[in-house]
Amino acid sequence: MSSTTRQQVLRHLALVADLQPPVQKTGKAPYPTDMTHDLFRAFTRSPHDVGGEFDVPVEWTEEEGEAWGYRAYVTTECLAWRGVWCAEERRRMQNVDLGTSQYLGLPYYGRWLLAAARIMVERGDCSLGELINKFDEVKKRHEPAR
Amino acid sequence: MSQHDRTHHAKIATGKGDPQCFKGTADGPPKFKVGDRVRIKHLPDIFYTRCQVYTRGAVGEVAVVTHESPAPEDESFGHVDHSEWFYIVRFKQRDLWPEYPEAFANDTLQTEFSERWLEAA
């Protein structure tokens, strides 16, 4: 337990707590001379690796599943059956690629949906332009008539 | 214009499951056996990993040799040509958390690693 690595790891976990969103204390785009190895490691960690990070106790509550969440889940499974991605690629996109703020700040199935949209754009199943237009079209559908 | 590899997981895992579909695909026999003492390597974890940072440098004992699969770091970017062995490793909680109460010295934690993260301790 007294190894240098362990000390590094525990220091890392304490530092990561300082980077928690929404407000980052270290400023934006610092000069390289202000960037230490410890800071680099803290900033580039996988955001889903929350084990050991400092936090307050979370009250456990049972939430009823919602239809949109189930649909998001089924959508991602269908993409897997079609060979678009495998589970590990999906986890990377929905848990890590989006960064700490989105990982902690979005609803659970919101991240699944974002990842599904992202993989389709990356794999060329639709262009980002098409997705944006569809997004806008659906959004307008739900806006009150003017 | 889609260029998915449709022979990928969806095809090889049908009727078998994942990771069962990777059985027999590791580059060799497992390097560790149940009861071996192993230390978790503190490798860079940029872009993706499932090796929890709180285990790095800690020593535990192999509890189960589980299965063969591409490592998460590779599979998460679609590299599935190489598989390796996976292990469930058991740690004493007191070896992971400096402030863990001595009254619970027998508490343990088990988690899973691919072979690249382990070295003999």
Image (spheres, coloured by chain):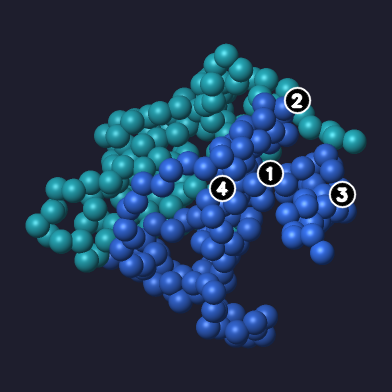
Chain colours: A blue, B cyan
Residues at discs 1 and 3 in contact (Cβ within 8 Å): no
The spot of residue A33 in percent (x, y) is: 63, 85
Q: Secondary structure at mark 1?
A: helix
Mark closest to the chain's N terminus, 1 or 4 = 4
Q: Which residue is mark 1?
A: A116
With respect to residue A39, does B106 lie above or below? Answer: above
User: Could you give the CA–CA distance between mark 1 and mark 4, rounded to whole angstroms?
Assistant: 11 Å
Give the foreground label among 1 and 2: 1
In the picture, measured across the screen, residue A109 lies left or right of residue A115, that is left
Identify the residue under disc 2: B6
Q: Which amino acid, by three-letter code, is at mark 2?
A: Arg
Q: Residue at x 82, y 52 (%)?
A: A137
Residue type marked 1: Ala
Estimate how packed mark 1 is, as few (under 14), some (14 to 19) or many (20 or more) residues with alpha carbons within 10 Å.
many
Residue tagged by mark 4?
A109
Q: Position of residue A2 (x, y in %)?
A: 28, 65
Which residue is rendered at x = 74% and y = 60% of the image? A144
Let me know if residue B86 appears in the view.
yes
Mark 2, other Cα within 10 Å: few <14 / some 14–19 / many ≥20:
some
Instruction: Please give the chain letter of the residue carrying mark 1.
Output: A
Mark 3 and mark 4: span between their CA atoms? 22 Å
Say whether disc 1 or disc 3 marks the residue closer to the N-terminus.
Answer: 1
What label sits on residue A139 in the rendered view?
none
> Is the residue B78 above or below the residue A110 in the image?
above
Q: How far apart in space, not on screen, are marks 3 and 2 (Cα)?
A: 24 Å
